[in-house]
Amino acid sequence: MIRSDREVKDPVLIDAMLSQFSTMVLSLNGEDGHPYSVPMNFGYEMDDKNLRVYVHFTKRGKKVDLMHRDPRCTLQFHSFLDFPDSPYKRHRHDYRRMTAKGSMEILDPANRLEEFRHAHEVLMHCNAREMEPRHTSSVPNMYMGRIVCPLHQVRAKSEFPLNKPEDVPYRNLCQPAQPSFPAGKTNKLYPSDRQGIAGS
């Protein structure tokens, strides 16, 4: 990384950044040699060694075929705030950016039900959604994916140095007050209710 002063290495700050991202881009190795990339919502949890990211998908499709061929993948998280008419410290924009490399593991509820349920609960928790009552007699008709990314394979960056978790949400430099949103809705420029599960 050329601008090392903008790199974010502290796992506490990485966790805080992840809590602000609403989606990510999952890139798999495509059959034609080009990356196959798709935006997805996600859940996550961290410990002192790994970032674990959870996604869900149907049991048939291109993603599943590619995952079986090669479980290696790259995750990209990004948000951007532009303020061209209100420069701040001679800057006209701010951003949060993160790239993680890991390996995908498919959790099939037919034979890994408890792992599947845990992954699903993390996904729902991180997206501030309530879990529906479980029907123990039925097996969900989908897969969960668990992507394990060693922390040394997680690279994060910000336009301005981040020193503490409170620095991570964007400051609105264009308007004095934060706009209100309908109940249950958030804007990526402001703190959200989304948060991961640390230390699991």
Image: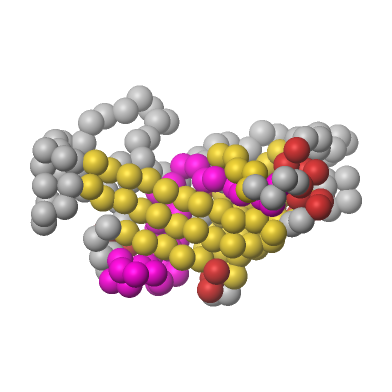
Quadrant location of the C terminus in the rendered image: bottom right
Residue at image x 56%, y 53%?
75
Q: How far from the left and from the top, in percent, is residue 36?
A: 65, 44
Q: Is residue 15 above or below residue 182?
A: below
Apparent side of residue 170 relative to residue 124 in the rendered image (left or right) = left
Residue 108 highlighted magenta (yes or no): no
Residue 47 appears in the figure? no
Q: What scheme was used to colour the molecule?
A: secondary structure
In this orientation, which residue lies closer to the viewer: 3 or 128?
Answer: 3
Quadrant location of the N terminus in the rendered image: bottom left
Q: Residue furthest top?
A: 182
Residue at image x 47%, y 50%?
77
Apparent side of residue 81 relative to residue 68 in the rendered image (left or right) = left
Residue at image x 64%, y 62%?
102
Quarter of image, res 64: top right
Residue 14 appears in the figure? yes
Q: How far from the left and from the top, in percent, is residue 139?
A: 85, 38
Number of marks in picture: 0
Residue at image x 45%, y 57%?
98
Apparent side of residue 134 relative to residue 195 in the rendered image (left or right) = right
Q: How far from the left and from the top, in percent, is residue 100?
A: 54, 61
Tell me which segment is drawn in magenta: 1-30
In this orientation, which residue lies closer to the viewer: 162 or 66?
Answer: 66
Residue 23 highlighted magenta (yes or no): yes
In this orientation, which residue lies closer to the viewer: 140 or 175?
Answer: 175
Q: Is residue 138 above or below residue 89?
A: above
Q: How far from the left and from the top, in percent, is residue 158?
A: 32, 59
